[in-house]
């Protein structure tokens, strides 16, 4: 059984890529909407929250845990691997290196939560691969709007935030919610190359499962959705998103 942790339904973009790789496991997707967003919380708060979710998923029988949230990955995964050495943790990585690999000369906009942008993990990557044509843009409140699903509010937010960035070549989507609004972003700043960590997570999961000899005998995948608020509308939105992108 594989657990997937996110601060809301945005991690469906990560789960999509994992399922596309043909991993026929039972998944438990834990959406922590009660504590959403993680990006404006302290490192201590985020780790305390995520550790409780990890304990819950382990008690449910998960042997592998995917941390789909960029903020939680940046803050928690190193410590979690030390505290739970027998558990396979796969964490989403900031996609900034992909810009270096595929379009390093382009002008780049990194859209992320403040927590991700300030994290040691992201800053190390940024300082290593910075092409000196990069703008770091904290997008406070955007994940919550995507979680809510109000298109008018999302579009107004993006107009206010992105109107002056129409000369951008690359957009790094530093939150798992953001791939769900690629078209909204393109409508404002035009055709750009998008980079996010979802694909990398899926391939890393496959590599690590093979390395450890972990297999699943399910004939097909199944997904159990749990939201910390118990709000049934969250489950409906998650199912709609999952069905629309598979």
Image (cartoon, rainbow, N blue to C red):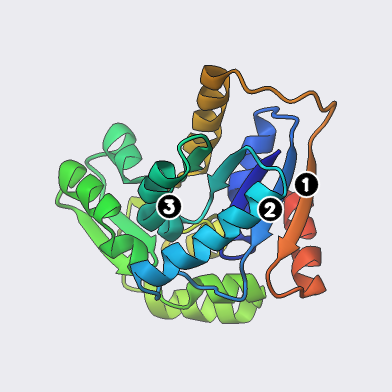
Q: Using the image as rendered, state which of residue 100 and residue 6 is in the foreground.
A: 6
Q: Label 3, secondary structure: give it.
A: helix
Taking the spot 32% from the left edge, 58% from the top edge, the residue there is 109
In percent of width and height, residue 231 lies at: 77, 75
In percent of width and height, residue 185 lies at: 49, 63
In percent of width and height, residue 118 lies at: 27, 64
Q: Residue 150 falls in which quadrant of the image?
A: bottom right
Q: Is residue 189 left or right of residue 34?
A: left
Taking the spot 79% from the left edge, 57% from the top edge, the residue there is 239
- For residue 153, above or below residue 43: below
Q: Residue 220 falls in which quadrant of the image?
A: top right
Tag 2 residue = 29
Q: Is residue 177 left or right of residue 28?
A: left
Q: Is residue 182 left or right of residue 238?
A: left
- Say few, some or many: other residues with alpha carbon within 10 Å of mark 2 (under 14 / 14 to 19 / 20 or more): many
Labels 3 & 2 near each other (Cβ < 8 A): no
Q: Which circle marks residue 107 in the picture?
A: none
Alpha-carbon span between mark 1 and mark 2? 7 Å
Taking the spot 62% from the left edge, 72% from the top edge, the residue there is 33
Which mark sits nearer the N-terminus, 1 or 2? 2
Q: Label 2, secondary structure: give it.
A: strand
- Say few, some or many: other residues with alpha carbon within 10 Å of mark 3 (under 14 / 14 to 19 / 20 or more): many
Q: Label 1, secondary structure: give it.
A: strand
Which mark sits nearer the N-terminus, 3 or 2? 2
Q: Which circle marks residue 73 in the picture?
A: 3
Q: Which circle marks residue 223 in the picture?
A: 1
Q: Is residue 238 left or right of residue 188?
A: right
Labels 1 & 2 near each other (Cβ < 8 A): yes
Q: Using the image as rendered, state which of residue 170 and residue 241 is in the foreground.
A: 241
């Amino acid at each position: 059984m594989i657990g997937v942790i996110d601060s809301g339904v945005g991690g469906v973009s990560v789960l999509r890529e994992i399922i596309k790789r043909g991993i026929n496991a039972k998944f438990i997707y834990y959406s922590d909407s009660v504590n959403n967003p993680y990006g404006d919380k302290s490192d201590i708060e985020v780790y305390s929250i995520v550790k409780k979710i990890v304990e819950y998923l382990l008690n449910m029988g998960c042997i592998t845990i995917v941390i789909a949230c960029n903020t939680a990955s940046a803050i928690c995964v190193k410590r979690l691997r030390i505290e739970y050495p027998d558990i396979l943790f796969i964490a989403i990585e900031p996609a900034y290196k992909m810009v270096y690999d595929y379009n390093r000369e382009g002008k780049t906009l990194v859209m992320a939560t403040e927590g991700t942008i300030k994290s040691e993990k992201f800053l190390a990557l940024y300082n290593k691969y910075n092409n000196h044509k990069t703008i770091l843009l904290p997008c406070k409140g955007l994940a919550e709007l995507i979680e809510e699903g109000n298109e008018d509010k999302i579009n107004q937010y993006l107009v206010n935030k992105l109107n002056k960035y129409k000369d951008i070549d690359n957009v790094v989507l530093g939150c798992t919610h953001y791939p769900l609004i690629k078209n909204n972003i393109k409508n404002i700043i035009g055709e750009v190359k998008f980079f996010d960590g979802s694909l990398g997570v899926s391939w890393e999961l496959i590599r690590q499962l093979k390395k450890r000899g972990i297999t699943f005998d399910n004939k097909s995948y199944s997904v159990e959705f749990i939201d910390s608020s118990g709000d049934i509308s969250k489950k409906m939105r998650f199912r709609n998103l999952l069905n629309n992108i598979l």
